Amino acid sequence: MQQALTAFFILAGSAFAAPRPQASTTSSAPAATASIKCPIVFDGRVPVGTAGTFFDSSNGLFNPDYVKGNDLKWSDILKFPTGEASRFDGAEYQAVEVTLSDKSIFQQQKGFRRAGLQFIQDSSTGPGTTGVKTLHFSVRQDTAKPLNLTHEYLNVWHEAADYSADQIMFQTGQIIGKSASDKNNFKILDRAGKSLYSVAMEKTAWQNFAIKLDYSKNQVQIYYSVGQNPLKSVAGPSSADLSGQGQFQMGILKKPTGTSDVVNAGYQESKLNEGQIYGGLFLEDSASGCVSL
């Protein structure tokens, strides 16, 4: 699986939630005021009190087998940081941190370090690839596991069914072959590498994103806010080629430096200890024009 994505990385910088584990009744984080207004297609929000081993099972919120280091379980990778809940998590759900280590090598892709969550019910021809859908995610940085922004990171993306391209990419760091002037920014790019939106990475606050994908019109609209503030439209609708169906991934794919063969070679630091914190992960149906803000 996913061997065919090599060319792309070299060239370019049932519709219901999965079963949920039992949540505890208390949380150390204050409740956010936001509520989801639209039908949920895939729900990746993690109930408070969920154990890491829950994600090793096919009964979990995400695919237990992909996409991660060959010798790792998700319980080795995922952490559950405390602190303020993200806007759409409130008191019921908790943040989840995707981490990288020296063992984060998927299949034989030795140039990459990667760990990408896939919604358990997402499939390459499923409901996430038709109509109008909006992907929500919030991100926060871990000061104890900072990203090395001299590298290029792919953090959220929708990969075509034939693995030849990513229709939409949420990235940070220095994009290979590009200037380092915006390496501290989050960038949302289309499959051709065209920038649709860019914003500086916050060091401590939650940053909330929603990417509305209109598969019938081939258009993308982006919403954004910081902390507990309501999301606002910040870009689009913009034309983008969303053809090719496929699946979502949320996590980290860290590219190497010093090579043109980023899949198989290049420099990666040893004793790697990096993380990206996520909250409010879900895909909603926006066919009626609905977007949760």
Image: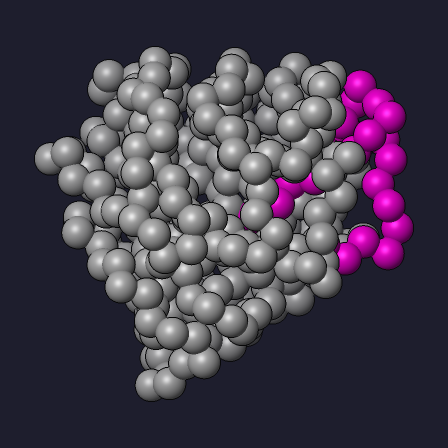
Q: Is residue 71 magenta?
A: no
Residue 256 within the segment the image draws in magenta: yes
**Residue at figure coordinates x 58%, y 57% from the top left:** 204
From this view, report whether residue 108 is shown above or below residue 175. below
Task: Kindly identify the residue that appears in the image at 24 percent across and 16 percent down.
Answer: 217
Q: Looking at the image, which residue is at 64% across and 22% down?
A: 13
Q: Foreground: 16 or 134?
A: 134
Picture coordinates of residue 137, whole percent (x, y) = 41, 48
Image quarter in which the N terminus is found: top right
Q: Position of 110 compared to 241: left or right?
A: right
Name the one closer to the observer, 96 or 260. Answer: 96
Q: What residue do we see at 34% from left, 36% from top?
A: 223
Percent coordinates x, y for residue 110 in the rendering: 79, 38
Q: Is residue 268 above or below residue 86?
A: above
Q: How is the image coloured?
A: one colour
* Residue 113 located left or right of residue 20: right
Residue closest to the eye, 46 or 57:
46
Over which residues does the magenta segment extend?
251-274
Asked whether residue 207 appears in the rendered view, the answer is: yes
